[in-house]
Amino acid sequence: MGPSSVVVKDLYARYAVSESWVLKGVNLAVGRGSMLVLMGPSGCGKSTLLYAIAGLLPWVVPGEVKGEIVVEGVDVARSGYRGLAGVVGIVYQNPEMQVVTRSVYEELAMAPENLGLPKEEVMRRVEWVVEALDLERYLNRDPQSLSGGEKQLIAIASVLTMRPRVLLLDEPTSMLDHKGARLVLETVEQLKREHGLTIIAAEHRVEWAVEVADRVAVMSDGAIVMEGSPEEVFSRVEDVERYGVRPPGAAEVAYELRRRGFEVRVPVRLREAFEVFGL
Ligand SMILES: Nc1ncnc2c1ncn2[C@@H]1O[C@H](COP(=O)(O)OP(=O)(O)OP(=O)(O)O)[C@@H](O)[C@H]1O
Ligand SMILES: [Mg+2]
């Protein structure tokens, strides 16, 4: 792995109302230009970890954070989100939290305008994202009138126009349809390849996760209990079952074959399944 973009050391975090720590000693290093997908059951702390990395907890959301968080050289535990302006973009799990303007066009232009970029550059970025995510038909719409999935797509688009160096995505495909999820995937991969974008995404959709992830981290009760490439993580059959992660379909077939006594390698993506199963 190249130089780290995001480093988290022995991180503890809690909300003001929490009775105990929500994050309990999280350690993490994410290489620049790579993508980490966080998985794990509801309530294990995925969103909380993203809020802490973005410097929102405890700076915007009241609470307490202990440990070390360094993002692109910024000591987040000390500076909070203010030290990360233009560096980190976050897309929340609930897109309602993010939509603030009266038209989709304004929504997309807002972030680069706030960064003080010249008008032509703002327009260039908006045009780029409209093309990449196929948003032309929404430009004059009131964001409030959009469906949940459409709002989510616009929320992702408006963060991408900021061209952050680190992108935090909280369940980015939860409301998207198949096409929307695919366009987001392709665009994020392009940014990763061409601009060295670093991405951390909490994601339940495992087939999507293994397509995009360089590394997968499985969380359980506020800690990271498994970490590795998708192949490494999903070949640890017993741990995957113990922590209740749903494996990709291709892996599940291999698990069943193993239970029946066949010594097969565990594929995580469909195209490798054909190889492994000799089809
Ligand atoms: N704003 C908040 N105030 C108080 N407690 C919170 C807050 N947000 C989350 N929690 C609690 O912190 C714990 C971790 O929640 P978190 O939202 O990080 O889980 P998650 O892994 O993102 O779950 P999901 O998959 O459902 O999104 C849970 O027990 C939750 O109830
Ligand atoms: Mg969450």
Image (cartoon, grey):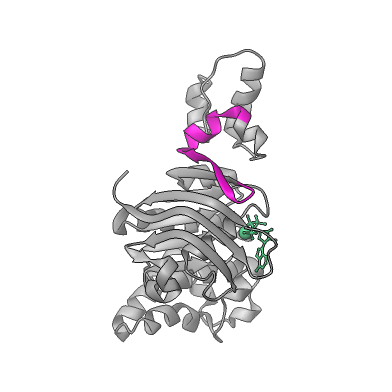
Instruction: Name the residue: 67% across, 59% down.
Output: 20
Say whether residue 32 is visible: no
Range of residues picked out in magenta: 220-238
Give residue 167's position: percent from left, percent from top: 43, 62
Magenta stretch holds residue 237: yes
Say whether residue 192 is visible: yes
Taking the image in four quarters, ligand 1 sits in the one at bottom right
Give residue 100's position: percent from left, percent from top: 56, 83
Residue 54 versus residue 232 in the image, above or below = below
Magenta stretch holds residue 205: no
Instruction: Name the residue: 48% across, 33% down.
Output: 231
**Quarter of the image holding residue 251?**
top right
Q: Count the marks: how many?
A: 0
**Quarter of the image holding residue 86?**
bottom left
Closer to the camera in the image, 161 or 34: 34
Give residue 135's position: percent from left, percent from top: 50, 70
Residue 20 versus residue 229 in the image, above or below = below
Instruction: Name the residue: 58% across, 60% down.
Output: 47
Give residue 208's position: percent from left, percent from top: 54, 47
- For the view shown, which residue lies furthest in the top direction? 261
Instruction: Name the residue: 47% across, 66% down.
Output: 54
Left-right relation of 81 to 147: left
**Quarter of the image holding residue 245?**
top right
Name the quarter where the N terminus is drawn.
Answer: top left
Closer to the camera in the image, 122 or 233: 233
Left-right relation of 257 to 32: right
Closer to the camera in the image, 120 or 234: 234
Residue 57 versus residue 44 in the image, above or below = below
